[in-house]
Amino acid sequence: MEPPLDNLVRVLARLPGLGRRSAERAALALVRRPEGLLQDLLGALEQARATVCCCGRCGGFTVRGADPCALCSDARRDAGLLCVVEEPGDILAIERAGVFAGRYHALLGKVSAARATGPGDLRLQALVERLRQEPVREVILALSTDLEGDATAAYVRELLRDAPSVRVTRLAFGLPVDSGVGYSDPLTLKRALGGRQDA
């Protein structure tokens, strides 16, 4: 049987962004004073497990009893703009930026041969249904710029090809803020030049 501290480190290391060393530091901080942080973490995890779920409409995070979520239910948001993202966490990131006032649709993944994820594993049929039922005039693809994100975007564009009243756009690509040309990879530079605007 694995020692409890080693088991805690192993489980924490499975979280995104935590490597073995970070997981060790987190585990030690948790067990050093179990009546403090560890107890709070246990309570927060239990509450999340009992109440957090995905919105039946957009796929974003909500709580049980609030489905559709607050973003889908907000009449002030523009129902004509639908931002398609890969994961619910992407919705949180865009909302933090405070620059989008439309609705969202999380695919819950992307087309990936490495992960054995095909179009049938994504919430694509739910997207098509939303376009039939909601007054969407533009679908904004806010997908990652890697090969899998590009493949997913191409698939969504093809899927929506027969919806002539719906404009399909993709987020602009370019240089990151506070970065220079010399630090950018060739694909980023190519996209930045291709998407240039009037100065």
Image (tube, grey):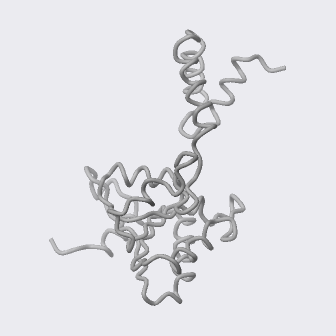
Return the x and y of residue 45 as percentages of the image width and height.
Answer: 59, 31
Q: Is residue 2 left or right of residue 101?
A: right
Could you tell me which residue is drawn at 52 percent across and 61 percent down? 58
Q: Residue furthest right?
A: 1
Q: Nearer the viewer, residue 132 or 104?
A: 132
In which image quadrant can residue 117 be found?
Answer: bottom right
In which image quadrant can residue 100 be found?
Answer: bottom left
Could you tell me which residue is drawn at 54 percent across and 55 percent down? 67
Q: Residue furthest left?
A: 199
Residue 160 higher or lower than 60, as above or below: below
Q: Residue furthest front?
A: 65
Residue 88 higher or lower than 34, as above or below: below
Q: Is residue 152 left or right of residue 117?
A: left
Return the x and y of residue 107 as percentages of the image width and height.
Answer: 57, 63
Q: Which quarter of the rendering shows the N terminus?
A: top right
Return the x and y of residue 156 as percentages of the image width and height.
Answer: 54, 76
Return the x and y of residue 174 as percentages of the image width and height.
Answer: 33, 64
Could you tell me which residue is drawn at 45 percent across and 63 percent down? 104
Q: Nearer the viewer, residue 87 or 27?
A: 87
Q: Which quarter of the rendering shows the C terminus?
A: bottom left
Q: Is residue 111 left or right of residue 87?
A: right
Q: Nearer the viewer, residue 53 or 98?
A: 53
Count of picture labels: 0
Could you tell me which residue is drawn at 17 percent across and 75 percent down? 198
Residue 180 higher or lower than 8, as above or below: below
Residue 16 higher or lower than 178, as above or below: above
